[in-house]
Image (cartoon, rainbow, N blue to C red):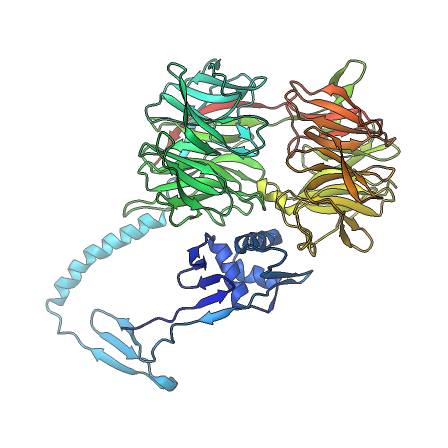
Amino acid sequence: MVETARRIYEFEDFRLDVEERLLLRHGTPLALTPKLFDTLLLFVENSGTLLSKDEFMRRLWPDSFVEEANLLQNVSRLRKVLGETPNQKFISTVAGQGYRFIADVRKITNGEPPPDVLVIESHTRESVVFEEENEGGHEAAKLVVVPALPARRSLRRAYWLIPLAVAAAALVWFALPPKPPRLLASTQITNDGHLKWQKYQGLEGPSLLTDGSRIFVVEDRKGQTLVQVPVAGGEAVPVPVPVPFPRFQLTDIDPQHSELLMLNWHGKAVALEGPLWTYSVANGGYRRVGDLSASDAIWAPDGGILFTRGDGLWSANSNGSEEQLLVSLPGLPHAPHASPDGRVIRFTLADPQTHSKSLWEVSRDGKNPHPLLEGWNNSPNECCGTWTRDGRYYVFQSLRDGKWGIWALRERGGWFWKSAGPFRLTTGPIDYVSPMISLDGKQLFAVGIQSRNELLGFDRQKNQFVPFLPELSANALTFSKDGKWVAYTSDVDGQLWRANADGSNRQQLTFGPSIVFMPAWSPDGKWIAFVAGLRGASWARTWKLYVVPAEGGPATDVLPDSPGQFDPSWSPDSKMLAFAPVPGGPLPSGMEGLGSQNAIFTVDLETRKVSKIPGSDGLYSPHWSLGGRLAALTAGLKRLVLYDATKQTWGQLVDDKVSFPLWSRDDKYIYFDSLGANGFVCRVDVQSRKVERIASLENLRTGGTLGAWSGLTADDTPLFTRDAGNQEIYAFDLELP
């Protein structure tokens, strides 16, 4: 029996089996994507050697053009898997050059392959030739086995024409492109203008459910409201929801189509989990599902419950008993869905470091977790998949080229299976999300989103928000210190522009493909700082800090080796910028050993030296006043704090959940948005700490190129970007070949 040599490496508590493509820690397998495994193998095989970024890109993506951020993402995720701490490092970053694996690596082998290996060289109908490999590189000896003389050769050849013809026909069939699934006629089901895309704590879930005759969806009608609408279209009618559900997430409907599964968010809902309930659409009765707490949940085909909690995928009985962890994952799973035959579970995995969302698959017993579409989307942002009832297709939503759309994946099956896709189903100017297949499999339902943002300014005399500079189609504004100029992100192209304060004399300052956000004009009027990155949810990991001359010219990447910068703010002398890393993202290059990922940093624009503000762990959104005082927000609770440079300490200024803190021009106040039930623009007197309400945000739906945004004009007039678009349910006739 021939034994094959295996490559096995050991370092610290880890064992890497190359042939099995398996990483173990203390004997326990760890979940790695194929690309993460390749990255680790490249590190381990070159332990102690400095590998350039170009070498990584060439070896890991030999036939693809990808952004350098893909490498940064892989290294960041690998550090997390290995459990790096400030006291235990495996990967060393060499600024501007590459990476080095610094752990001691031991190579283990079970012996070299034996020298006498019998190899088949060729095999035809008339002879079989065997070649035996000899040591020393001498010509191998060949053994030829001659078959018996053929009989009735001409008749045999005639018979062979039949399989040859069949094979030729099969080749032609396989060469033809598969007929793709497609959408036919469409019908708009609702027309009420209410927000329908269910979002909670940044997680998106399937928000459409049906019992065959009705569609259930959660709308924003001065709070979450469960409504039902006929599948043929009509008025959306509110469904009374009992008291235990002030804030809830609609997750599934049972196989009998009589009970909805709901997650109940309670208290201030800062957690990502809540108790699970069922709600009868027939009689309004409800019950708690045991003591089960989850971040998302569905009914399983076997009658139990599949749910997510933390980084785990779990199962339980229908009454919430006998919870069982199926698998722990390298991210936060949500939107699970089981195949109709119950063999596999697919779900969306959110990476808190890269802010990407990708579809994963795992067997029903929790084995073999892996990405479903690895490499299909350079900036993964897929979610909320569901199967057709016959299991032949899997449909999901994906963000590609800045547009949400519905895609279909043909499932593998049978001898004559062809390419699976994915196939794009939706096109056009409308974004589509939350796909749902009708019970008869003939229709696809989805939420159509037509985005339109409107910039508003607060009119103090009318005590209301009114349109502000509508001719600019702008959001994320910043004004020069003298108030004569405004810089902004254009809603049309996502680029940075500047104009006179009245909107005239417009000039484009940046040019794609990246989009721009958070511009900040320097106090000396010479520069504009901003962050820019690629479109898509995972583009947040590519947010980088730039400065561009206010008069126009090339933009400069301030920290080229450090992605994930956020919220720039100028020092009063215009020589430094304060910033914070993207929440959950990597620390600036060279700062990895400084503790918390949420912290405030400064960069000297002349020397490019990065420093950490003392005591700023757990803080973000820094804002310098013209007088040199620094304010920030605490992570999670978002309390407003102020820095005492003399004592190098931070003190709480506002004990409330706030966003978008901005200094007044005279340094006396900090304006902010209060994130209470109704919402207000407020300001706090820095000396007296008295909070004053300025404007109500009630009935104003937040909008913007990249989400909510609030700001101030040069005279401290509050600005707000309102979502003036609409979201409606559409039905499509579906053709699934």
Residue at far left of view: 152
Total number of numbered discs in the rendering: 0
Horizontal side of 692 relative to 402 (left or right) equals right
Of 589 and 270, which appears nearest the observer? 270
Q: Position of residue 695 (x, y in %)?
A: 74, 19
Q: Position of residue 723 (x, y in %)?
A: 64, 25
Q: Quadrant of residue 473?
A: top right
Q: Is residue 311 above or below residue 241?
A: below
Q: Is residue 547 above or below residue 719?
A: below
Residue displayed at 66% across by 38% down: 635
Of 413 and 97, which appears nearest the observer? 97
Q: Position of residue 140 (x, y in %)?
A: 32, 83
Of 361 and 517, which appears nearest the observer? 361
Horizontal side of 191 relative to 569 (left or right) equals left
Q: Position of residue 275 (x, y in %)?
A: 47, 29
Q: Is residue 192 above or below residue 333?
A: above
Residue 555 visible somewhere in the drawing: no
Of 626 and 640, which appears nearest the observer? 640
Horizontal side of 97 relative to 384 (left or right) equals right
Residue 659 visible somewhere in the drawing: yes
